[in-house]
């Protein structure tokens, strides 16, 4: 049997009081903060139920997020957490490398994530012939611009830099390190929530998430689009 390395899931979460500014046209500041916290709990719940993860690390300085993390047994770190997504993950990668862990990082705004998605991701990643060789597996966002899940063995195998156009640069960075990236497409992982259009796509998915329950409690939202993505007379509702 091939040895399986220890994997720590890292979830960076910025302060939720300023979360999801691109939803300001349809949600109040309080709603956006609650939405961010609820999506994070959906993500954390899936990670906590996933077999194959040795630990979960949440990088945040947000007290409400830290409290939720504690309920799921996740460790909380403030190291570089206020310096942005990339800095928080880089700090975690250095820490995990020193402790002999591999790195799986996912964002806090993919509420459709299920433990089965993690199982599939780990299965593909562990299928390498040489289990001790460095490996890099990535799940892109639905527009193939962002990187919605990245698994590195070892944790520092590839320097990670996140942003709206990180997917292709991550592939290039892996190849620069001599690694052929494994690209996996998982519909539950691909949908991150930043814009009204993203929320509309989420509402089309009939999933039993905390986020869906929250949005249902708020009632129909004014999510209006035509085929080009802007303008229409329709409203999205559960």
Image (cartoon, grey):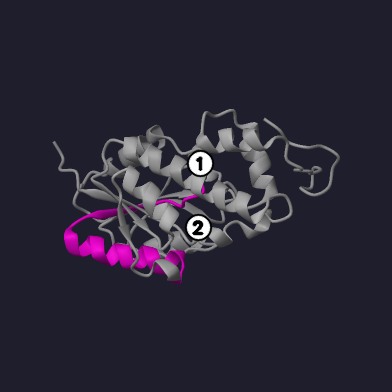
For the N terminus, the quadrant is: top left
Q: Is residue 92 visible?
A: yes
For the C terminus, the quadrant is: top right
Pointer 1: residues within 10 angstroms few (<14), some, or many (20+)?
many
21 vs 1, nearest the viewer: 21
Q: Nearer the viewer, mark 2 or mark 1?
A: 1
Q: Is residue 141 visible?
A: no
Question: Per the image, is 147 magenta?
Answer: no
Mark 2 residue element: helix
| Residue 49, placed above or below residue 107 | above
Residue 37 numbered tag = none
Residue at image x 62%, y 49%?
31
Seen in the image, is 226 located left or right of residue 82?
Answer: right
Q: Position of residue 78 (x, y in %)?
A: 35, 65
Q: Position of residue 70 (x, y in %)?
A: 32, 48
Which residue is tagged 1?
111
Which residue is tagged 2?
167
Q: Position of residue 63 (x, y in %)?
A: 41, 58
Occupied quadrant, residue 60: bottom left
């Amino acid at each position: 049997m091939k040895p399986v390395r220890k994997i720590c899931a890292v979830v960076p979460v910025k302060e939720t009081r300023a979360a999801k500014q691109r939803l300001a046209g349809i949600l109040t500041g309080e709603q956006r903060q609650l939405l961010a916290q609820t999506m994070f709990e959906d993500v954390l719940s899936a990670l906590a139920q996933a077999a194959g993860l040795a630990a979960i690390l949440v990088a945040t300085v947000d007290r409400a997020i830290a409290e939720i993390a504690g309920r799921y047994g996740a460790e909380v770190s403030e190291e570089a957490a206020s310096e942005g997504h990339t800095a928080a993950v880089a700090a975690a990668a250095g820490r995990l490398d020193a402790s002999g862990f591999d790195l799986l990082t996912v964002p806090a705004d993919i509420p459709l994530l299920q433990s089965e998605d993690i199982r599939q991701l780990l299965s593909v990643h562990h299928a390498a012939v040489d289990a001790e060789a460095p490996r890099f597996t990535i799940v892109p966002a639905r527009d193939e611009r962002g990187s919605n899940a990245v698994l590195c063995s070892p944790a520092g195998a590839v320097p990670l830099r996140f942003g709206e156009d990180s997917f292709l640069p991550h592939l290039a960075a892996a190849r620069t390190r001599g690694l052929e990236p494994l690209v996996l497409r998982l519909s539950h992982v691909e949908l991150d929530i930043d814009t009204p259009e993203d929320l509309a796509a989420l509402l089309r998915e009939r999933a039993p998430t905390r986020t869906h329950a929250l949005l249902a409690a708020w009632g129909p939202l004014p999510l209006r689009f035509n085929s080009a993505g802007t303008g229409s007379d329709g409203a999205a509702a559960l």
